[in-house]
Amino acid sequence: MKANNYSSDISFLDIKSLRINRYAKIMSTGIGVPKKVMTNQDIIDKYNYVATDRAVQFSIGIKERRWVSEGESVEDLMAQAITQCLERANVNIEEVDRIIYTKLLSTQNVPASAVTVLKKLGVKKGIPGFDVTCACSGFVHVLDMAIKYIATGDEYVLILGGGVSSKRIQQCKNPSTKTVFLFGDGVVAMLLGPSKTKHFLSSYIFTNHQLYDNAFIPCGTTMLGKGYQDTEHDILTMKIVDGKIILDSAVEYTKIIVEKLLSMANMTLDEVDYFITSDQSTRIWEAQVKALGIPFEKSLSLFEKYGNTVAAMSPLVLNELISTKRVKRGDVIMMLAHGAGASSGGLLFKY
């Protein structure tokens, strides 16, 4: 695989059949987002940057994002998303067999936030739950896992993606201008349940370890080993070495994933009603759509409104399409997500 400004000798595995006899379908979605809207000008004023709203919009295509207020936690957003999701499906939380949450950062590493939110909701049942860390590609990972849990006996699996990226940014006196405008807060929930008919047609996920060090968050033993101090602005905030690599890899990965998903389902791109992908910036979204040669009317980006919500990006778009009735039952959806170049994946399904 070769891209514009980097090369990789990683070989990508062949796609495998899902081999599922007990089918799963998307029952509902729900979102939890902070009330506080932070415009570009709000950030410029807060940190006294020499920049303009117009310049930020031109550079990355964002107008505003949501940031949590004092005392607002990721568990609050998770609880909002879960409540809305389950109400839409008319399913009680006690009926859920499993909860999987994919994150970038959470309140604490242990217990898992998937467990902590059960306390927040006052659940009386010990529902199994765990967290997965795959950055922006996380939701396709947990969606792939959820349909396999349904296949092996679970009735309802609740998956969540997203989180709170602004907490550390708001604490910093001088956050990096490379990332301060990019990130927004939000969580998306999705409920999977059983189906008599096949909805998920193909799934494909892979990693590229050669981009492991291009975008990362210093924490854990890495932070301790390099002697980071609490006063440094980059602790627990995303560091991006080369943003163009993220763009180039997203475009190349999109072509790889789409080809494999379509080949397994024996379909063409023309048969796909909507193409959804992670939009780390407007440019990254546009580049993926252009690379596939599909009309922009068959895709959607919410980056200018919500920013990079990490694992919530792709499902946030799906929720928007469903809630605005642009997607209806039976439509064919291709949903991709890319995790800072290090991991990517996608699924093809009938909603």
Image (spheres, helix red, strand yellow):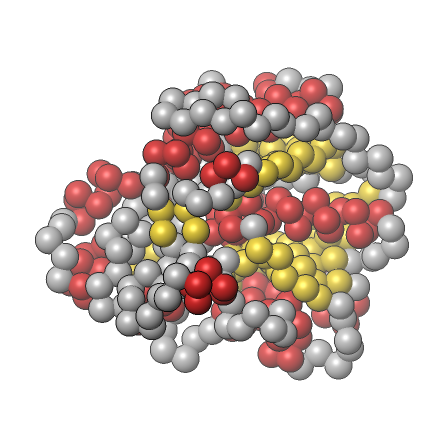
Height in image: 151 above or below 327?
Answer: below
Q: 225 left or right of 132?
A: left
The image quadrant of residue 300 is top left
Q: 141 left or right of 217?
A: right
Height in image: 55 above or below 183?
Answer: above
Which quarter of the image is occupied by the C terminus? Answer: top right
Nearer to us in this view, 14 or 121: 14
Name the residue at 29% across, 41% down: 60
Name the residue at 57% across, 55% down: 133
Nearer to us in this view, 108 or 101: 108
Name the residue at 69% across, 35% down: 203
The image quadrant of residue 45 is bottom left
Q: Residue 215 at what x, y percent from top left?
A: 41, 46
Report if residue 324 is visible in the image: no
Q: Residue 130 at what x, y percent from top left?
A: 68, 64
Report if residue 290 is visible in the image: yes
Q: Residue 186 at what x, y percent from top left?
A: 47, 60
Q: Residue 158 at what x, y percent from top left?
A: 69, 59
Height in image: 294 above or below 138?
Answer: above
The image quadrant of residue 228 is bottom left
Nearer to us in this view, 326 or 157: 157
Q: 209 left or right of 7?
A: right
In the displayed orientation, state which residue is furthest to the left: 50
